[in-house]
Image (spheres, rainbow, N blue to C red):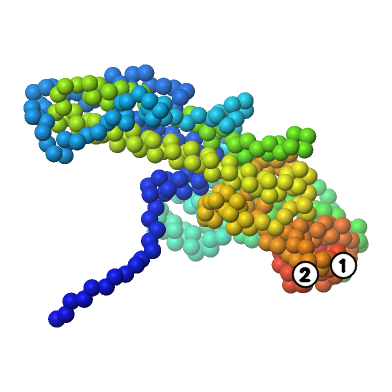
Amino acid sequence: MSLSQNLQQKLLQKLSPQQIQLMKLLQVPTAHLEERIKEELEENPALETGEDGHEDTFEESKEEFETPEDDFDKDGSEDEYGNIDISEYVNDGDDDVGDYKLRDDNYPDQEETKTIPHKVETSFYEILISQLSMLDLDERQHKIAEQIVGSIDDDGYLRRELSAIADDLAFRQNVEASEKEIEELIQKIQHFDPPGVAARDLRECLLLQLERKSRDGKSVETAMKVLDKYFEEFTKKHYEKIQRGLNLTDEQIKEVITQIIKLNPKPGGQVGDSNRMENYVIPDFFVVNTIGKLELSLNSKNAPDLRISEGYRDMLKEYDRGAKKDKRQKEAVLFIKQKIDSAKWFIDAIKQRQHTLISTMQTIMEYQKEFFLTGDETEMRPMILKDIAERTGLDISTVSRVANSKFVQTEFGTYRLKFFFSESLVMDSGEEVSTREVKKILSNLIEAESKQHPLSDEKLTDLLQEKGYNIARRTVAKYREQLNIPVARLRKEL
């Protein structure tokens, strides 16, 4: 048996608790930061806000740690408590823990309400359940109807098969129900609001909505015939075939198209909580153009007034002044120190979060200055995460976290930060331009096209190349798809 020694060198990256906490806080949007701070306040009594200082903290906490003298160890000589250093906590000076606080000093004049506006909403499921009372159902039928409603997706569609619903009822509710019985109840639920709910597919959804409007005239009846017999042709915009099949004039087919495009393809999408975040976004930053000078401010909810509890520091001073240092007192002091350190870590992380947000957004604003001044997407420069990381000195992953989860409000609208990042494209002149610029010009070309003769991808490529953009047809097709614009055939109108 031989023994050998090897010398190995390993490169390891170990994150400190503060770094981990910062990364987590960076991902928290402004809308939820208040809630995250509230959680920390509840967990750590050594942390408090400036708006409601706890005047009784010292007396209440002091009582919590007080114990009759007879219960203390008399000698207080245990090694584990023998070397408690609390000098940094009790000495008055520049590093005084009582002054360890975080205030919104960056924007003292910014007035902003501290309450987040919100809508009081009823969930989509609750809206449907409340309508069950309008049906004349016995207890068993009510259970079946509840199961059906519970199977409806957030967008309003019922995608579960009848057999699957029957199995759910048998296993979960101990109710035997035939597929015919379930289908009859589905048809009743399809009369609920919003119109089109509980449809199995888009065709049925649109037909259900048209049935509610059947008294509105001949064009509605014709639209129902089109969806019933020529749904696939309609989705592919083969209007000539529909006209021949139903013997319709150009005017009649236009009326049919008008009736159908007014319908809602997602009846559940505009009700309840499912669409809330699409309707309301709380911006993290505000950019204001003041006579050609861009001014950046951070939403003041990102700069809360946090500080170390004065009462907890007083308890340490009380301990420091005492002559007797027994075990129970030392245990209490160790607990207090741990809570104060935890509070300091959290305040540091909030400060660092604030600095990181401002630094990142300031750099993006300066990099894309022309866009923030004009709102013109064609003025946007190519910009990748590395560009901002190099200028701020931050890690690329940190910039990515900020870009993916934060919003900025401008006079031209509210944008997610990742909107400003794009790859570059080389023009014939050798100049590099943002792919965002190319997409905007592509969008403008399609918007200005004749809807009777929409531009093909090949024609769009030619037009872009005429403007000096060196781009392939497959790239044009990719950009068009990213813009959610259908192919020319599906853009055609009569």
Going 72% across and 46% down the picture, which residue do you hit?
A: 369
Is 318 placed above or below 86 here?
A: above
**Residue 171 x/y as whole percent:** 39, 58
Is 254 placed above or below 34 here?
A: below
Answer left or right for 327 relative to 33.
left
| Disc with the residue nearer the chain's start (1 vs 2) | 1
Query: Which residue is the site of mark 2?
Result: 471
Camera sees residue 43:
no
Q: Quadrant of residue 334?
A: top left
CA distance for labels 1 and 2? 10 Å
Q: Is 190 or 489 nearer to us in this picture?
A: 489
Camera sees residue 259:
yes
Labels 1 and 2 touching (C-beta < 8 A): no
Going 33% across and 33% down the picture, which residue do you hit?
A: 340
Going 46% across and 24% down the picture, which residue do you hit?
A: 50
Residue type highlighted by circle 1: Glu
Assign the N terminus to one quadrant of the image.
Answer: bottom left
Assign the C terminus to one quadrant of the image.
Answer: bottom right
**Residue 410 x/y as whole percent:** 70, 40
Answer left or right for 175 relative to 473.
left
Q: Quadrant of residue 273?
A: top right
Query: Which residue is the site of mark 1?
Result: 466
